[in-house]
Image (tube, grey):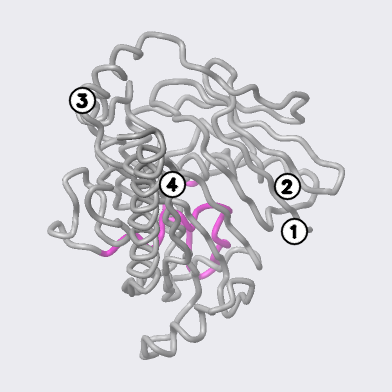
Amino acid sequence: MSMKNSFMHGLLKRAIQTRAYTSLSERLHHDLTTRKIPLFFDYLHPQQSHLLNLSLQGILPRSLNQDVPSSLPSIRNPIPLPIGHHLVYFPPQVSLSQLLPDGTDILHTPGEPFNRRLWAGGNVHFPISGPALDGTRAVCVESIRNVTIKGREGEGKVIVTIERRFGTVPEGESEAQTRSRIWQEDEADLGDSSIIENRDLIFMRSKTAEEIELDQAQFDKPSRTVRAPTNATFRHSIIPTKALLFRFSALTFNAHSIHLDTNYTQGQEGLRSLLVHGPLTLTLLLSVLQTHLESLGLRVAHIEYKNLTPLYVDEELTVCGKPKSDGAWDIWIEGPSGGLSVRGSAKTCPI
């Protein structure tokens, strides 16, 4: 084959691959964004929040949990939902048959060959102060807002952006009425939502045996780190234990094996230990930040964050933050070696 013919053959092959890749991207985008996810109902009793407070007692800044009562708070004089505690309400209401082999559910998966799932980051908007924990019936309206594929053909990762809107709902309201009242086509339209959260989940191909062996060979070697910001206004260190990971998995109805099974995590994912949950990381970030803001008469109105490197069980993490010139805050989490693991920013408003 001449050089010219070889060059043209290569161009044709790449063009065919590009069309196939575009077709996959378009198909996944259509299939997932039109997927109707069931409504998640819950009652805003203080129990879940109370159990989370007990689980975090002693590891958060003292002003947040020094007065955690041993008995369940009253719903006659209800407290507002603490910042970040929405994450332990509205668990995925799926049966065991709707769980995949790694313990994750089928609600957001793009399907084969994208069988591995990790939490990449997201954002949360708090339009109002937290709703009262008075036993009111509430709902989470969830939808898949966007789907993108990144990476080379054959090695691509699928990023699924999930929107979750929370609001109270009266008994007897129809599903159609609930959806139209809380979910809005325009993402900027708050509707009747009290909290709006977006999550970015990354779905990847399973690792080959060779890839896992290479990962395992690196377990005892120092990993590359990203330099963290400097001049933090506050710093608070935490060591997430196996007990904490188990309790958070139980509170969120999360059976993902990367948080519970060391043999699975090392042998199937090629990660050196159990991973700290993405929503637990967000809970810690919000809780520590809010402690500092309360002394300034402020609360979190919006937060966005990105998970850069894994955080592991029994390894110290440090939540840090500092104000920006525009009144917002830079926030981040450093891993045990001081490298940047989570990077984010927050906007505030008066309490």
Q: Residue at x 53, y 25 (%)?
A: 317
Q: Is mark 2 on a helix, strand or loop?
A: helix
Quickly name the residue at label 1: 351
Q: Which amino acid does label 1 sit on?
A: Ile
Location of the C terminus (image quadrant): bottom right
Which contiguous range is marked in magenta?
69-93
Question: Is there any visible trace of residue 248 in the rendered image?
Answer: no
Locate the N terminus and report the quarter of the image it occupies: top left
Q: Is disc 2 surrounded by few (<14), some (14 to 19) or many (20+) residues within 10 Å?
A: some
Q: How far apart are marks 3 and 2 (CA)?
A: 44 Å
Looking at the image, is mark 4 or mark 2 earlier in the sequence? 4
- Residue at the far right: name it: 325
Q: Pointer 2: what residue?
A: 294
Spatial separation of the CA atoms under disc 4 and disc 1: 23 Å
Q: Earlier in the sequence, mark 2 or mark 1?
A: 2
| Observer-nearest of 151 and 165 | 151
Q: Which of marks 3 and 1 is nearer the N terminus?
A: 3
Whichever of labels 4 and 3 marks the residue nearer the N terminus, that label is 4
Can residue 315 be seen here?
yes
Mark 4 — residue?
52
Q: Indicate the amino acid at tag 2.
A: Glu
Find residue 168 and report its horizontal and vertical position in percent: 48, 77
Q: In which quarter of the image is residue 174?
A: bottom left
Q: Identify the residue at horizontal 39%, vertical 52% (top origin).
A: 15
Query: Which residue matches tag 3?
Result: 267
Q: Do the residues labelled 2 and 1 touch (CB within 8 Å)?
A: yes
**Label 3 vs 2, first from the N-terminus:** 3
Badge 1: residue crowd in 10 Å (few <14, some 14–19, many ≥20): few
Give the label, 3 or 1, closer to the camera.
Answer: 3
